[in-house]
Amino acid sequence: MKQWYEELFTGYAKSYDKEMFVQGTIGEVNFIEKEIDFNKNAKILDIGCGTGRHSIELAKRGYDVFGFDLSNDQLAFAKAKAAEAGVDVVFEQRDARDFNYNQKFDLGIMICEGSFPLMETDEMNFSILKNAYNSIKPGGKLIFTTLNGLYPLFHSVKDFINENEVGTDTKELTFDLMTFREKSTFVVTDDAGAEKELKSNERYYVPSEIFWLTNSIGFKRTNIYGCQLGAFSREKILTTEDYEMLIIAEK
């Protein structure tokens, strides 16, 4: 049986690229470039690359990029976009819970919940971070974003549920304080115009958990910031008003 995220990204590539939350690519890649000091020799791994928006933009700027994703439909669209842009990006179908490139990359990126924290267990999410660590060279970095558990805590679960899209597209939404998991029933329209109803299960994290996870895996330094669409910055202090957080873990 397919998980909800596998169902979501089946036949949902062109529509995905039109979503509001994926429109910050240029600003996000600007930040990524600064984090690697504009080193064109850097090898970059895009984990859960989806339709390849970050991979392709980085390749346009002269970087060597490898992207993988679980969804063949998303990858097919990524390959078509790369060909249209005239850039070479290696795109492969892989599972983020089971990969290891043996310290091949200088930088790993996992933006807009590119696999982490969509998994159905905490152990799977931990495996994704560990696999990323094993694929990055000593001295390299992992840049990723995840859902900020401080947001629903501060706003109270009741207010959080009322404020977050229960309506036409989202039919049901719950948040479990014991597991920090949001479960929802929502409807999406795929590329063929067909509607499908899905039941999601996403994990929110508080900063202390992220520090524990990255330290346990072996990262030497971790910094956490507020995450703003298209405007990643080390100057943005994480607050209870940030729906997502930006994490930079250094190996």
Image (spheres, rainbow, N blue to C red):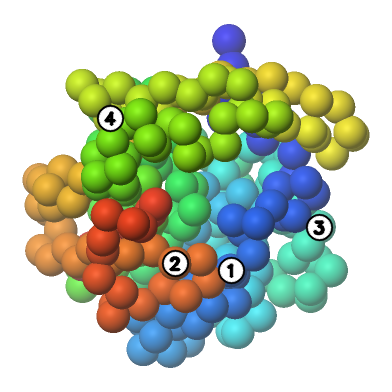
Q: Contact (CB < 8 A) between labels 2 and 1?
A: yes
Amino acid type of the residue that numbered disc 1 sits on in the rendered structure: Gly
Q: Which mark is residue 11?
A: none
Q: What residue sits right under mark 2 in the picture? A: 228
To which quarter of the image does residue 125 belong?
top left
Give the CA distance from mark 3 to mark 2.
28 Å
To which quarter of the image does residue 54 belong?
bottom right
The N terminus, quarter of image:
top right
Between 106 and 157, the one nearer to me in the picture: 157
Amino acid type of the residue that numbered disc 4 sits on in the rendered structure: Phe
Amino acid type of the residue that numbered disc 3 sits on in the rendered structure: Ala
Counting residues from the start of the chain, the first of labels 4 and 2 encountered is 4
Q: What residue sits right under mark 3 in the picture? A: 80
Assign a secondary structure to mark 1. loop
Amino acid type of the residue that numbered disc 2 sits on in the rendered structure: Gln
Q: What residue sits right under mark 1 in the picture? A: 24
Counting residues from the start of the chain, the first of labels 4 and 3 encountered is 3
Residue 162 in sight here: yes
Give the CA distance from mark 4 to mark 3.
37 Å
Counting residues from the start of the chain, the first of labels 1 and 4 encountered is 1
Give the CA distance from mark 2 to mark 1.
9 Å
Assign a secondary structure to mark 4. loop
Between 111 and 62, the one nearer to me in the picture: 111
At label 2, counting other C-alpha atoms closer than 10 Å, the crowd grade (few under 14, some 14-19, many 20 or more) is some
Give the CA distance from mark 4 to mark 2.
22 Å
Q: Nearer the viewer, mark 4 or mark 3?
A: 4
Residue 3 in sight here: no
Q: What residue sits right under mark 4 in the picture? A: 180
